[in-house]
Image (spheres, rainbow, N blue to C red):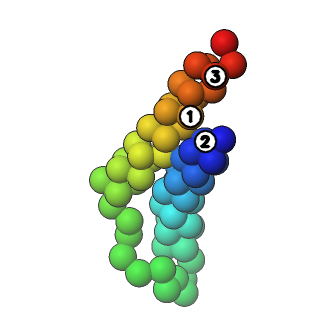
Amino acid sequence: MIRLVIGLFLVFGAVGEQDFWLECHRAADCLAGPAPTISSLVLWSTVGLALMAWAAADFNKKYS
């Protein structure tokens, strides 16, 4: 269960970082720093999805 939650937080964090920077960049007084790269978004989202897939496979094995 913890792998599912950690994976979900990793995906939400990666997407949220990108979204926050885009919204902040549109504001006049943005102090967010350099833009996050697409490769970091893809990397963290892939790690999160892999953790969630691993948890789903264990749930399936445990409860079937």
Identify which residue, 15 or 22, lies in the foreground: 15
Q: Earlier in the sequence, mark 2 or mark 3?
A: 2
* Residue positioned most to the top: 64
Q: Earlier in the sequence, mark 1 or mark 3?
A: 1
Tell me the amino acid under the disc marked 3: Lys
For the point 50% across and 68% down, which residue is it?
21
| The quadrant where residue 3 appears | top right
User: Helix, strand or loop at disc 3?
Assistant: helix
Q: Which mark is residue 14?
A: none
| Discs 1/3, front | 3
Q: Which mark is residue 4?
A: 2
User: Helix, strand or loop at disc 1?
Assistant: helix
Q: Residues within 10 Å of mark 1 (few under 14, many from 20)?
A: some
Q: Position of residue 4 (x, y in %)?
A: 60, 42
Question: Can residue 13 be seen here?
Answer: yes
Q: Earlier in the sequence, mark 1 or mark 2?
A: 2
Q: Which residue is mark 3?
A: 62
Tell me the amino acid under the disc marked 1: Ala
Q: Position of residue 33 (x, y in %)?
A: 41, 81
Report how far apart the C-alphas of labels 1 and 2 lie in the structure: 6 Å
Question: Can residue 38 be seen here?
Answer: no
User: Helix, strand or loop at disc 2?
Assistant: helix
> Is 51 displayed left or right of 5 in the figure?
left
Q: Position of residue 5 (x, y in %)?
A: 64, 47
Q: Are marks 1 and 2 in contact (CB under 8 Å)?
A: yes
Tell me the amino acid under the disc marked 2: Leu
Q: Which mark is residue 55?
A: 1
**Quadrant in the picture for the C terminus:** top right
Report how far apart the C-alphas of labels 2 and 3 lie in the structure: 15 Å
| Discs 2/3, front | 3
Q: Is residue 15 above or below residue 62?
A: below
